[in-house]
Image: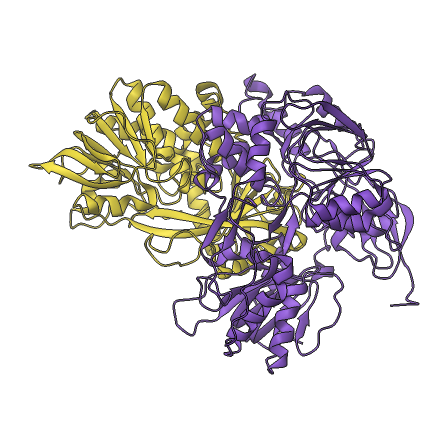
Chain colours: A purple, B yellow
Amino acid sequence: MAGAPERHFLFDGNARTARPGETLLGALTRGRLPILQRSIRYHRPRAPACGVGYCTGCLLRVNGRPNVRACRYLPFDGDVVRTENSWPSPRLDLLGVLDVLFPGGIDTLRGFRRPAWATGTYHRVVRRLAGYGAVPDLGAAAGLAAPPVRWTVDVAIVGGGTSGRAVAARLASVGIRALVLDRQLSAPPLEGADLASRTTVTFLPPPGGAPDARFALLGFEEPARGVEVQARAVVVATGGYDASLLFGGNDRPGVVTADGAFALLDRDGRPPFERAVVVGGGERAEQALARLGSRVTAVVAPGAIDPAVVRRASEADIPLYPRSLLLRASGRSRVRTLHLRARGSGARFSISCDAVVLAHRRLPTSQLFFQVGARTEWRAGTGAYYPVLSSSGETTVPGLFAVGEAAGVLSESTGTSAERAADTIAGRPRTDDPAPPRVAQDGPSELEGYYRELWREPRAGRWVACACEDVLLEEVEDAVRGGYRGIEVVKRYSGLGTGLCQGRYCLPDALLVLSLLENRPPPEVGYITQRPPVVPTPLAAFAALDDPAPPREGP
Amino acid sequence: MTAPARSAYRIVVVGAGIVGLYTAYHLARAGAGPILVIDRGFLSSGASGRNGGGVRQQWETRATVRLARESVDAYRRFGREFGYNLWFRQTGYLFLAETDGELARLRSVHDLVVSEGLPSRVLGPDGVARLVDGIAPDSVVGGTYLSTDGTLYPFPAVWGVYEGARALGVEVALGVEALGVETSGNRVAAIVTSGGRLETTTIVNAAGGWSAEFSRRAGLTVPNRATRHEILATEPLKPFLDPMVVRASDGLYFSQTMRGEIVGGLTLRNGVGTEGGMPSSPRFLKEMSRALVRLVPRLGAVGVLRAWSGFYDDTPDGFPVIGEDPRCQGFVHANGFGGHGFMLAPAATLRIARAVLGEPLDLDPTAFSPARFLAPERPASVERLQLG
């Protein structure tokens, strides 16, 4: 796209530009972390945190359409972009006073019942606080109307990352042209396969009872085109994401996942921070060090730090703090200090910083396995559920395969995992039987012990258990104290996991917390039913798929 | 699983949904103990945790209107009585008519509702458009609106009644399934559960969508049918819609919750029975989305956040089944509420409790008694407004 013109748009009335291929978030960052939102209950300042389209930190109104994720949007000339849910601006929102007025939290379960004559006023006030964006402008949906895309293929691969592409390439080498559905906004082309880019699969129902029943996937292409795919075999290569972590002020602007930090880099690779603390001691922390380089001020880890990370940090004179409890991130509208304690009742200490980059834990993107009814198993080592797989990478649902990080395959085995699945689909199982792919092992959980130790610490600052709905850790504890047990009930009691990310970020930690509070292993705490869609899917996209026209091949 | 503490109870209620818990609460207040409520799922795992939170008084029969009106009063008091805030918002139910025939049907509902002293209004297209900002032009010929209908949060109602009943000594055992009933002569003698056999003389079947299955396990054939209904919620938006909106023709309904989500559903003819579980279907997502976007086009730009489903417990005449089964002394029905158990629960469960205690009921037996399905005659009246 060299030489393509810049895009000119309005942001809260000011003229801004986006370079070709630059996301709206990228255009609004340019080396300075923007505060674009406020939290839903306490109006705490929120900055982009996840970088991959799930958190609420970059929701903006674009051309009259609310809740557009700036990290998932490529601006057009003439776009009108506005901040919402704050007055006068996200940086200086007067409703931020709620955070000060209600240090113990707002009790919407039991509060606001008296006096009876005031309930109407309570309703009006609380309703106004709810919601991120306002209803779409009249006509906002008209601009989104697009005929749906329908594909009928042999093999659909969900995810165009390393492992999805490896499966497609292997299939192409034996003459099978697969369809790769890729969520990335701009993906490199693929040889020998069809590529549906900017496309998110959000619903994979179980195939019907007939033996030749095909999978029927639903999803959408950004911004709102309906996509439906019929396939004989489906390969889930949805990868993984960086987890959040519970500590005081864990929602402060500047606390980001490694995914988020990378999404905030400008085109020269510069992040919008000077002194980042990287959290984690494994492969992901090493990647964070490699990409954030001189902007890293320290590496802290809940557990041990791998030799590779130690080596890389020492080369750059970056101090290391293995086995540390993260207690609190303090600072007003930006994290300024990270407060810690060495584990095993060691000394308290703090690190001055302007970002905390969470790279301590990778989790599989696994919703589709639950939707389709594939059996999953809990692995304590990572604290996540993975699909149960045959040696060829097939799940318990015939015709459904899982590869790469979504299947718990370690990065060095991505190729093996992809080859096995492709060869089985192509009907050419390997005869030489090389070593099977290495997967995330079950084993003692480092984080369970970490949280047990953290629980003995006095708490300061808001511990946000669910950032989308502003649910505090105390509310989760209240639910358990009140006799409400199990994640399904605690979810309904507290609202945890019911927001825009549908539990993607809060659920993994909540399972460990409930396990601790209820004194039983995480699998007994249960799991939240993974309901469709995986990510919010525009009504217009689903509506267009109701068109009775017969299926046709995709473009 | 929470195991029952005793081996014998005076009353065992099957189903810890709003109907079962509220019945136990009324019974405990009347001093009838010991009482056990069992449920094979977790609290709010059934329809009580899966409905759209609508509470309306617009019905086709006087008996239902009265139960609904009494329930609205109870929900207004709920916060003071049970300590939980339901956020019960009386911002009305708006029924939409697309044809003159539908409007005529709504008009007869309106006449009945007005005769019961409720402030129902008949609206033309302009009146409807004032209540639904952005409704597609020419999409309706009119509608009826009752401003004292409303919406609430189902979950805190379950928590409140659960805690209220327990505070009065009711025991609630979750994760315990009712497997069968032992009788002696035509009398209930015991209930067999996954947590063991429990002696009792009274069993209340408040199992919602699973009530027919449990009646069968007790050897009783009933006409109840479980039908799966789907529902979705969108991303939360700032407030723009006050009433619950229901369309008579296809059962489309939607409202905006206190949290700002648009929550709604549509009637699809799904198969009968609970065997298939409670999944969501592509068909529902497509048809519901199209119906909603056609009626309110601007919503096309809003994201669907999640979809789920639950079971209605339907009866042939649309009335619930309240009272002792004539074939089995001590087996009391508290089921058949269709998709409207939540709306009617406070008032209906008061009658269920009276039936358990053998007290006279102020309900028309030809409409509510389980005996009505055992007689060969046609039902005396029918409640067909099974929407939203």
Q: Residue furthest bottom?
A: A175
- What x and y, as percent, mark residue B188? 14, 34
Task: Answer above or below: position of B207 versus A77.
Answer: above
Q: Position of residue A347 (x, y in %)?
A: 71, 22
Residue A293 seen anywhere in this rendered image of the structure: yes
Q: Give the vertical position of B232 relative to B119 (above or below).
A: below
Q: Position of residue B284 (x, y in %)?
A: 49, 58
Please tell me which residue is depicted at 58% across the width and 45% down the height of the picture. Answer: A502
User: Which residue occupies the foreground of this view, A528 or B359?
Assistant: A528
Q: Nearer the viewer, residue B151 or A342?
A: A342
> On screen, A553 above or below B286?
below
Q: Residue at x 71, y 24 (%)?
A: A98
Q: Quadrant of the N terminus of chain B?
A: top left
Q: Looking at this view, is B101 or B296 the one in front?
A: B296
| Picture coordinates of residue B34, whole percent (x, y) | 24, 22
Residue B232 falls left or right of residue B114: right
Question: Is B258 or B123 nearer to us in this picture?
Answer: B258
Q: In this rendering, would A519 be left or right of B336? A: right
